[in-house]
Amino acid sequence: MNESATSPTASRDFLREIVADDVEAGRTIDVITRFPPEPNGYLHIGHAKSITLNFGVAREFGGRCHLRFDDTNPETEDQHYVDAIVDAVRWLGYDWGEHLYFASDTFERMYECAEALIRDGKAYVDSASEEEIREARGTITEPGRPTPDRSRSADESLDLFRRMRAGEFPDGACVLRARIDLASRNMLMRDPVLYRIRHAHHYRTGNDWCIYPLYDYAHPLEDAFEDVTHSFCTLEFENNREIYDWVVENCPVHSRPRQYEFARLALDFTVMSKRKLLELVKGGHVSGWDDPRMPTIAGLRRRGVTPEAIRAFCDLIGVAKTNSRVDIGKLEYAIRDDLNTRAPRVMCVLDPLRVVITNWPAGRVEMFDAPFWPHDVPNEGARPVPFSGELLIERDDFSEHPPAGFHRLAPGREVRLRYAYIVRCDEVIKDAAGNVLELRCSLDADSKGGAAADGRTVKGTIHWVSAAHALPCTVRLYDRLFRVPDPDAASDTEGKDFTAFLNPESLVVRADARIEPAIADDAPGSRYQFERLGYFVSDREDSSPGNLVFNRTVSLRDTWAKRSGAVTEDFGRPQRSRPAPATTSSAPAAPPPRTSELVERFRRLMQTHGLAETDADLLTRDAATADLFEAAVGAGGPAQSIANWIIHELPRETAGRDVAALPFDGEALARLVALVDAGTINSSTGRDVLADLVRDGGDPQAIVERRGLAQISDDAKLIPIVDAVLAKHPDRVGAYRAGRTGLLGFFVGQVMNGTSGRANPERVKALLTARLDT
Ligand code: ATP
Ligand code: MG
């Protein structure tokens, strides 16, 4: 067993409790699980939940997980799907070693088990029609009646069953049924069908078979043949558990697997059935199984989502015993959280408007060194960004008649160009029809870096590219596939096909976008944050150096809630589409109704502390969280920093624990945030200190001292480390001196690693450049 299975703070779901009990009681020696997809479609995010569960449990308990193709239906299965599934599970980060199985490889053994059941009088061939069998099965209030063949002798059934196999009968002529109990309260136990005749070609066994086993018979046998100990399936199969047990107990098999059920994943704004996904593909509603709007693993991958984000999402939603729909905001939250430290920041203009700088010397180009990462991300690196007299900005960052609160560019107004200068719009050039063609702006030469020399304030900052240097590109803005949260339910209530609820704006293409040149040579599949716009990935199929294509993975914030009108002040209703706090418990998707006291505090957080609505919402879902926030702010903590720490960092550490029971108070949190804000520790160290606080309480300053976490700003300590890094990489030092100054980020990263992230990055950069530039 590894740490996460034994650690007292890791929350264990009910299935892991069951496995742990079995292991501790000695009922299970080696834990064996399986992921059993049917190769009739691509895997989706619901399957990811099952994959992380099955492979996760096996890993945590030192057992193993099998990948098994449950391929007992010849009509819909295909090798192409097998390949796609293998690919997806591997991409998600799981490995089954040599334990790859196909149910179809065991058809002969399944057949032998069926003959044994017949000989034992536990199964019979029934020649009644499907209709007659259904009719004789009774209802919930009435017991079933025997069909005439129920009294068939074992010999006669055996003979007929062999002739079924030999292909003597057409499809539907007869079936093999278990002889169990026609009066059972469980309808599924009223002599279930085990085998049916299907003259069809199977993608692996070809025409070897014309009888195929049904799920209820095949699945328990597959588990037993492979010595699976814990067989996890979704809740719809709860009633099937009785047959499962009956099959395992009555067939000649040696092992005794057990089935346990958990809630299937249902995600808002999408559908999760393979049949419906296939319909979307076949109907041309999407470009294929890997269309970035599809909830398939292949689609998410092409959209730029990482396996880590999918696993983090599965962790976040946990495993529970009741079905509930999951807010898609939780998936988006996991994706943003993952990409934040993974995607370098660059500038891209989607809908360009030309800006001519009238007081810029003709032909002059200035290079700005722009960091790839914001301060709160522990990565380093920068790229040169060219600035010239002809720029492109986002068309909607200019407004000729700016509404109140518009802080971007407008006639006579100033705006800051990210990393560069402050410019003022002096003139608007239009065509005859009144369309804005170009802006003439003058630049404040004393505002390099973005601050005005005379201290005047300029509120807005916008992104831009240099017209002559920028690369043309196509940007695909993907959005939710459906326009309603629950397309299946909408389809039922309104009596329309589910495709009637597709979101017509799920794909908007910007074919005339421009991106800064630094990314020119990046490999397809590279991920970025386009500043102010969202996270993007270059499309691994369609993008090439001369034809750049980017897919939007996710926007920076959840803008959907407002658009769909789902945000109301009525907290009694489920709030859709909010970023989720990272609980690992099996919390239901929607927050509970809020008391009027909490509604009042929600307003206060916005009015008194100036928090955004989303933040205020997340902080007032329960009284303890709101108390913690207000106590920390009362102790002098800056409201927005405190809010960020509580919303984004705390849930990771508490792992679902009740905030009211934490061993530290708001004052301690305020002291921690002050240490980070003062630069005594950097934010990633701050997270370590928070983890200590959550576990043991205490004083943040004392924790920093005891664990020696203080940021190292002392040159005497840093210089030897800097020199060691440079000595270790002579080739890169040479390359840097030959002009590849972008390598500075590499060196900074090495020094940060050498100090477990504690070095002061600004000092490190200064020392490195001093050394490298001599
Ligand atoms: P679908 O309804 O999409 O066709 P399925 O259950 O028929 O799905 P399988 O290929 O049989 O698809 O599924 C393989 C495994 O994945 C099964 O163990 C099943 O329980 C699990 N699984 C399928 N869908 C979900 C889901 N939405 N949430 C959790 N687990 C799922
Ligand atoms: Mg299935």
Image (tube, helix red, strand yellow):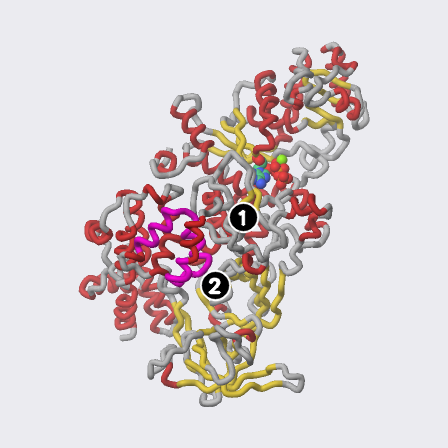
User: Residue 166 appears in which quarter of the rendering?
Assistant: top right
Q: Tell me the quadrant of the picture where the C terminus can be found.
A: bottom left
How crowded is the residue under tag 1: few (<14 C-alpha within 10 Å), some, or many (20+)? some
Of the two numbered discs 2 and 1 on the same chain, state the one appearing first in sequence.
2
Residue depicted at 43% across the width and 49% down the height: 621
Residue for badge 2: 529
Q: Amino acid at mark 2?
A: Gln
Residue 724 against residue 34 in the figure, above or below: below
Give whichever of 761, 774 is nearer the camera. Answer: 761
In magenta stretch: residue 614 = yes
Give whichever of 604, 190 is nearer the camera. Answer: 604
Residue depicted at 37% across the width and 67% down the height: 743
Q: Is residue 223 left or right of residue 286?
A: left
Give whichever of 731, 260 is nearer the camera. Answer: 260
Q: Main secondary structure of the magenta part?
A: helix
The disc label shown at residue 573, or none? 1
The residue range painted magenta reads: 604-632
- Residue 89 placement (x, y as % from top left): 53, 43
